[in-house]
Image: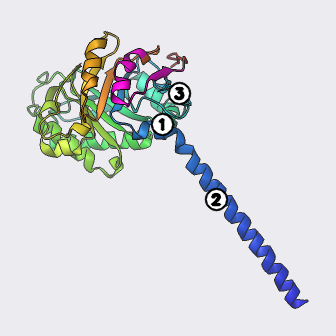
Amino acid sequence: MKNLFFTLVTLIMVLFVTSCSNNEDLVVASQDAQPVATRGVSVKTPKLTTYIETNDINPLNMGEYYFTGTEADKDYVVDHVILFASNIRGTVSTVELYHNPNQTYILNNRNTLVKPLQDKGIKVLLGLLGDHTGVGFANLTSAQITSFANQVADCIEVNGLDGVDFDDEYAEYGKISGTPSPSGTNFSSLITALRANPKMSGKLITAFHYGYAQYFNQNALNAMNYMWPNFGYGYGAPSGFSNSKWASMSIQYTDGYPSARQIQSAAQNYGDYGAIMMFNVRNYDASGTMNNFASRVWGGKTVSYTGTSYPKNY
């Protein structure tokens, strides 16, 4: 009886362990299955980045483009969405990361306005822009650089964003006296300080190649993931910056520039450039513009649109 008892106990334990192991396998399999939808956008080159004017357009609209002939929930076209834009504001002695009411609403409602894009494998970045205060990315003091880098890193971490993009416009450098002279060196120090922040580990740092971003030093260039040119096509990567991190094409969607023929021509010999950028994309079908380059840069693929349009409901 004793031996039988221990035999029964042993058998029950084996069955229990086997059952737990099977359940764990099911959990792992389920977790492994979840990212399948992201693989389409995560592996293709060049990446497609879109700037979304959040004052006008719901960012969810960028998740409605997929490669024709695939399941619409498994092979998305847009890789990066930039929420355009929050601002840098400051005085001679202070600097502030500012979100207008639209940006604030999106960040406060990220589970419904950001996470659905991320669940599709699309990386969502915080766009930053000057705000007419005379203080910008290129004329901060050492203390302000540290402060602003920390503010940005905290915002990215708290809101579960995938990175940050810099657009050095509208700062109105020289508007106030007593600030450092703006320079690429100063802007570079901000980029390297941000990259050194542990909260930015694995996060993207990108920039519009405009203003003092045209004069980054090599340390800043090394810290960047991507840069986008002033709108147009055929731009070569800046000296010291890899083609794999450069968008040789920047498309103004609403103005139709470059033209369809110019986009097609540039895409035909796109080479090893790592990205394409479109800005001012709206909440209606942009697949026609995307198809001017899609089949040429992505091995014959074409883009379809689901037809779902999200209104700006915030």
Secondary structure at numbered mark 3: loop
Query: Dot 2 surroundings within 10 Å: few (below 14), some, or many (20 or more)?
Result: few
Give the labeled residue for mark 3: 69
Segment colored magenta: 288-306
Q: CA distance from mark 2 to mark 3?
A: 32 Å
Percent of width and height locating residue 249: 25, 24
Amino acid type, mark 1: Gln
As for residue 273 lying within the magenta part, the answer is no
Percent coordinates x, y for residue 2 in the rendering: 87, 90
Q: Calculate the distance from the C-alpha at mark 2 to the C-alpha at mark 1.
A: 25 Å
Query: In the rendered view, would you say 239 is above or below 259?
Result: below
Front position in the image: 48 or 58: 48
Mark nearest the camera among 2 and 3 is: 3
Q: Which residue is mark 2?
A: 25
Question: Could you say whether the residue bearing mark 1 is in a helix, strand or loop?
Answer: helix
Q: Amino acid at mark 3?
A: Gly
- Rendered location of residue 79, percent (x, y): 40, 33
Give the CA separation, mark 1 to mark 3. 22 Å
At label 2, which amino acid type do we have?
Asp
**Mark 1 Cα shell of 10 Å, populated few (<14), some (14-19), many (≥20):** many
Q: Which comes before the other along the chain, label 1 or label 3?
A: 3
